[in-house]
Image (cartoon, grey):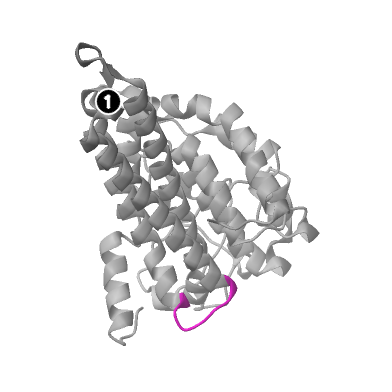
Amino acid sequence: MYRLDAAQHRVVADAGTVADAHVRPHAARVDQEGAFPRESIAALSSHGLLGLTIPAAYGGLGHGLRTMAATLETVAQRCPSTAMVYLMHLCGVACYAAVPDRTEPLLRDAAAGRHLSTLAAGATKPLESTLYFLLRDDAGISVAGPWRGLGMRGNASAPIELEDVTLGTERALSDSGKGLDMMLGVVLPAFQVGTAAVAIGIAETAVQATIGHVTGSRLEHLNSSLADLPTLRAQIARMRIETDRARAHLGAVLDALETPGPATQLLVLEAKAAATEAAVTVTDLAMRTCGGAAFGGAHGLDRLFRDARAPIVMAPTSDQAYDFIGRALCGMEVF
């Protein structure tokens, strides 16, 4: 449904190969230990994928949001925590790429796999904010304890604390007071599209795991498989429809971003809520369909169930998104 050309397809296929070999094997441990997926990110880095959306002029692969979405879904099918870390990096990179005259060294380091980015927000007046980039070794930066999330436990989303941090204008990513312009024009589309892709990856994995369980499990006393039960087949059909619907919606969002029109803003606002709520529905159906096996940890469905719920509370939350969408539909100012 992403309608990739040959070059885009090769990148996504290569990402799948890397993820099969170096991301999937660590997914269960990352979840169990709440560990940052260092090995997985290192693998993406060593294969040039941290530079996926960086222009070729700065050493990157030069791809856009369509390839980014397909690649993120591919990684998320193997490990949603890794995919979310990867997405946050790509959102940071998008900011750098918007002002390359200020950030060329960062772009080149990220393309070479030497730089991993993320985003942090804490402005009290976002309408008058200015965006800056901070480096790991800057004085006054600390992480407020470990992260112990219910889902996406490798995401390392603990708050960052800043104390007496001083930055010069050379660290500014946006013009003074114009941070919101970059957040809405650069960060929001990438984050909305990327989060939707991660959610679809979770849903797709749940669909495939459920099909595998139902077709591979037998009721020996009846000499039949679980797939012979029409109620379970119907649940799988619902899961397939929900996942396909979410992916088709994301395709429409990507089309609107590539050819902007009156509906573009609305579709971008819809993207995250539509896909993440679909992933919640699909993983809930997976747990119900696979029953005791799923609740006992089979096929990693319990992890997918928890991971699917993390993005719905990531800002903008689904409830916030519904308000934004409603405001847009009512002709009101969205932000």
Q: Residue furthest top?
A: 221
Name the residue: 49% across, 78% down.
177
Q: Which residue is mark 1?
A: 226
Counting from the top left corner in percent of width and height, residue 311 is at 35, 51
Kindly indicate the quadrant of the structure image that contains residue 234: top left
The residues colored magenta run 258-264
Name the residue: 26% across, 22% down.
293
- Prevailing SS of the magenta stretch: loop
Is 291 placed left or right of 164 in the picture? left
Packing grade of label 1 (10 A; few <14, some 14-19, many >=20) is: some
Name the residue: 71% across, 49% down.
111
Give whichever of 249, 229 is nearer the camera: 229
Location of the C terminus (image quadrant): bottom left
Q: In the rendered image, is residue 117 in sight? A: no
Label 1 sits on a secondary structure element that is helix
Give whichever of 38, 19 is nearer the camera: 19
Is 102 placed left or right of 138 in the picture? right
Name the residue: 50% across, 62% down.
251
